Image: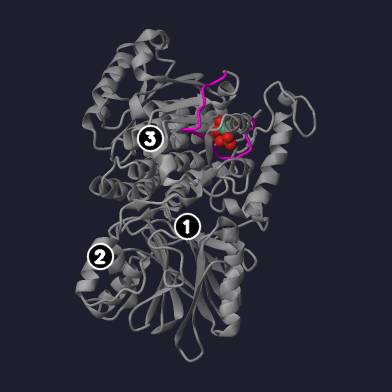
Amino acid sequence: MCGIVGYVGTQDAAPIVLHGLRQLEYRGYDSAGLAVIDRAGQVQVRREAGKLINLEQAIAAEPVYGAIGVGHTRWATHGPPSRRNAHPHSSPDGELVVVQNGIVENFMELRRMLQAEGYVFQSDTDTEVIVHLIHHHLHNGSAGDLEVAVREALAELQGPSAIVVLSRRHPDRLITARLGNAGGVTVGYGDGEMYIASDIPAILRHTRRLAFLESRQMAVVTADGVRFTDLKGEPIWKEVVAIDWNPMAAEKGEYRHFMQKEIFEQGRSLTDTLRSRLDFAESVVTLPSLGLTPQQVRELTKVTIVACGTSYYAGLVGKYYLERLARIPVEVDYASEFRYRQPIVESTHLVLAITQSGETVDTLATLEEARAHGAYTAAIVNAIGSQAARVTDGHIYMQAGPEIGVASSKAFTASITDLYLLGLYLGQERGVLDVELRTALIRELSSLPGLAGELLEEAWRSGRYRQLAERFYTYHNFLYLGRGINYPIAREGALKLKEISYIHAEGYPAGEMKHGPIALIDASMPTVVVAPHDSVYDKMLSQVEQVKARNGVVLAVAHADDPVMAQKADFVLPVPRTSELLAPILAVIPLQIFAYEMAVRRGADVDQPRNLAKSVTVEKGGRDKETGRQGDRETRRQGDRETKRGASRSYGL
Ligand code: AGP
């Protein structure tokens, strides 16, 4: 996952930047680079593919000395990992360099426009578009004002980005900006020196006084301080927050709980999930760690998805993707059920586990069982190096980053996105999706992090969910309804509410309402409907009417510009418009925030809900393999230990 570290002050920038990048290594990356303005006023760039040690060796061989610099660890989106694709990227005359986290959705158009202007591209990246665009504006229209040129360039970018710009003409300043939710920008205050980082741990050694950029904000950072503006250049005031030295607590940054942080970083986790899997130029999806040969893909006759809890609901969405995009029959089962029902497993089946921890005992046992029957096994897994990744024939890492809150949020949206990528990949390899269709689907997919960012910004700004929690926190029961591809989202929304706020909630397929649950409806049982504009929208509308006819209260996950739903539902939880297949990835986010705010309002322990563990390493009622102790009693303690151990093992926290 990309990381950014910047420094301006009186010390040598390179060691400080490299140390910061080291702190972000655990997030994963494939290349690294750094730019420093040297004592002669020249911008020196060093970049290397592979581990940071390669960059360090390159710098040792050819040192760079200067008191201002910026570094980057890259996780490829556009173009393979290589020195030429590593950041920073430079303008043709070497005047400017830029590092970026995020995706420029319209980079093809911008690249073509800049090429027509005479810019020659040295890399395959979308970031190079940004540096040329700033350069273009600097020399055409901004009257040579770098800040104005940066703002003009940002106005042309679509999609989420966090950038840092360094210019030879302004050797005293770093300009940083954030568009959308591709990752944070933190400004750290020192004494006569200042820092920039995508993630707090990178600069925690030097400062604990921090300010955080919101979307569409910019900062001009010099050794003496920082000036914040919006993207029109209007000054803005920012609170400086004192952060705990404890690295774990510091990770939380501006958020009250890890779960809140994890919900609000979904713009970034979705960007990271797409990274390196999409070749935008060729419209091809690559999943090398899945390990299936083209022949195995063609010969697949069935996919069986096995998982537990939230991951199981991701699997239910995945069924739609794989069947729709790759035309393969898919069965989804709870791992805890599958292993005991003597399932039919054959060598042409792919048994696919979904697990954020990679340590869930039922899921692991199922994989073992499937392997014994000769199936190809694979896992979509978040925790790097976990058992699920080790015991399977192939895997797809979610790239959601560490998820500390017990209730899963960003791992859920990452796993659904991975299932979508898997559907595209299998469809492409089986010849079901032609290049034209793939191009359209990939383009749509690349807009997802930006849309999630928009949704999250609105939620943060509006205070809507705190108000809803104030209104509903005393209720004891909720019904969640969804249909088609959003039915699993209703179940996941209900699970989130249950597990962190301890309110009873049921997730139901909307069409089943009349077969029983409708009897429950009255003013004391609110109904949450997941109703984006899709092929079953009219049916969802009629559910809303039925609930209203029985004095029920309706909260609708719907589009902000849907006047019909606005009129019929009591409250709208807005989601941006996207395609029907991608809608669930956005639709779940309001339900996560709602559950979170309800739990906070009820004073619950959001990150460590009672009776739950992050990794369920014992079977309910069974015995722990390591200790031989009884499972039910031991699950939480074991889970706590596993959470900490898993976090330190997998992510170095
Ligand atoms: C999610 O919020 C829950 N904590 C739980 O349902 C979880 O998804 C389930 O235990 C499966 O865990 P896994 O993804 O790590 O296998």
Residue type pointed to by label 3: Leu
7 to 274, vertically: above or below: below
Q: Position of residue 621 (x, y in %)?
A: 70, 20
Residue on which disc 3 sits: 322
Q: Residue at x 52, y 61 (%)?
A: 29
The foreground one among 126 and 378 is 378
Per the model, the C-alpha gap separating discs 2 and 3 is: 33 Å
Label 1, secondary structure: give it.
Answer: loop
Residue on which disc 1 sits: 184
Dot 2: within a 10 Å radius of its alpha carbon, few (fewer than 14), some, or many (20 or more) residues? Answer: some
Please say whether residue 354 is one of the residues in the magenta stretch: yes
Residue type pointed to by label 2: Leu
Dot 1: within a 10 Å radius of its alpha carbon, few (fewer than 14), some, or many (20 or more) residues? Answer: many
Query: Predominant secondary structure in magenta?
Result: loop
Which residues fall within the magenta stretch? 342-361
Circle nearer the N terminus (3, 1) = 1
Question: Ligand 1 falls in which quarter?
Answer: top right
102 to 308, vertically: above or below: below
Disc 3 residue lies near ligand 1 with CB under 8 A: no
The foreground one among 28 and 18 is 28
Per the model, the C-alpha gap separating discs 1 and 2 is: 24 Å
In this rendering, position of residue 637 left or right of residue 255: right
Q: Position of residue 582 (x, y in %)?
A: 34, 39
In this rendering, position of residue 224 left or right of residue 316: right
- Specify whether residue 520 is in view: yes
